[in-house]
Amino acid sequence: MKQEVPPDITIRVVHISDLHISEQLISSTANQVKAPHRYGHNFKAFIALDAFLNNNPWDVVVISGDVSRVGSIDSFVWVQTWIDKTVNVGASSLGLDLAKNTNRHYVIVPGNHDRFNGNLKQTSLDDYNNTFPVVRSGKVVAFSFGAITANFHVFDTSDSNRTFAKGKIDSYDLTPRTIAKNSLDIAVLHHHFIQPPEQKRERSTELTNSQEVANYMLSTGFDGVFFGHTHKSFVDYLPTGLITRMFPAKGQEAAFWKSFMPKKIIDWFSVNPTLGYAREPTQDGKYPSVESYFTYFYIRDVLGLDVSSPADFRNAAGFYAHLETFSTRNNLNAEIDKLKDRKMLVSMAPSACQAEAKRNGFHMFDFNFVNNALRKIDTSVYEIENGQCKLAKKSAFLVQ
């Protein structure tokens, strides 16, 4: 039996999401009944989370949006104080005190609730941006761990559309990004861009441009993507090519699945595709294949080259011919095939401490590097019950 080589460097990342901190830190049951949308957090669960983070080693905490319940400035300031310093609440002293600890870091992005400004519709991030680092197009938050740089590519998926939960990433933010071999590259956003197969699809809370975002995330070559929003947990390490095949052809899901997938995989994913978003049709109303769409987005969004969309062609055959000419001219076929074999870590964190969530919790990852290359990812799923953080599931994924 081949002995496992110990890692040269391990970077531990804790992924939490959807804190939903209310204006009032400790709210009574009576207040929750009167205004449940304003008193959204489970304070007992938050104390458990704080205790875990203060009593266990980690390098980076990622907070993937919905810091606040209704976007109140008080809740933002309180969370920022909790991250950088300590805060006393009754008999409890809470806080990560990162201002004094240069060996620990945090990454944070806004969610739809952070745009509410005290209301129940998305308007602006003014209060959030006055408290936390502004997420701008192309922004990367980087930390060094020996010879390895951990790059967190941050995205703002909240949208000033005055809706409650739908989100969007503007096209100008889906720009080509450089992914180095000896680095860790994680995309961080709030809204879900895939729909885990065992979970019910939540159409009313999706990104309005999910197909575009999903293709971009998959084709860029990130080591992983972290998000939340659904308050449900999902962790897996999947081949990019497998995920791209889960775009259902409109009205032809069954035939598509049978033609591409082994029966055991079909059974595993059941009838709910991981990615369930419509693609752009050609002029005759037909939809190009998912494989061609993946190539299209890779050329357009990752390489930043001028490639025509399906709507520019009378039929799918014309679109395919255009892509083939493009791929041949730029010698991209081998590069795209290699990318489809690459696996990507998907972490959809549950709500850490929202009061109404069926299950509170968070995820933790050990990224193990050998000879400056990522070789293994250890994953731990924690649930918070009765004020205690309990390990619910542990897995290990080998990196090719």
Image (cartoon, rainbow, N blue to C red):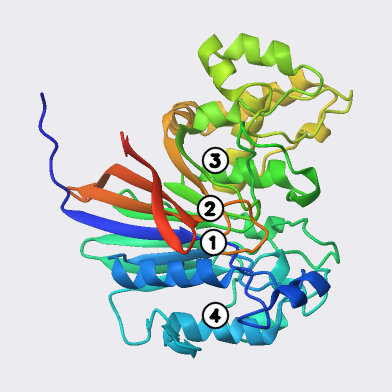
Separation of marks 1 and 3 at Cα, in angstroms: 26 Å
Q: Residue 108 location, x and y as percent?
A: 53, 69
- Using the image, determine if residue 371 lies above or below residue 74: above
Separation of marks 4 and 3 at Cα, in angstroms: 32 Å
Circle 4 Cα neighbour tier, 10 Å, few/some/many (<14 / 14–19 / ≥20): some
Disc on res. 349: 2
**Which amino acid, by three-letter code, is at mark 1?**
Ala
- Badge 1 vs badge 2, beta-carbon distance below 8 Å: yes
Q: Can residue 303 be seen here?
A: no
**Which amino acid, by three-letter code, is at mark 4?**
Val
- Residue at which label 1 appears: 352
Task: Give the farthest residue toward the right.
Answer: 284
Please state, as top left, top right, bottom left or bottom right, where the C terminus lies in the image. top left
Circle 2 Cα neighbour tier, 10 Å, few/some/many (<14 / 14–19 / ≥20): many
Q: Residue 272 location, x and y as percent?
A: 68, 27
Nearer-N-terminus badge (1/4): 4
Q: Which element is circle 3 on?
A: helix
- Residue at which label 4 appears: 79
- Residue at which label 3 appears: 218
Nearer-N-terminus badge (2/4): 4
Please report the residue visible at 56 percent of the width from the left and 53 percent of the height from the top: 350
- Badge 3 vs badge 2, beta-carbon distance below 8 Å: no
Q: Kindly report which numbered mark, 1 or 3, lies closer to the viewer in this rendering.
A: 1
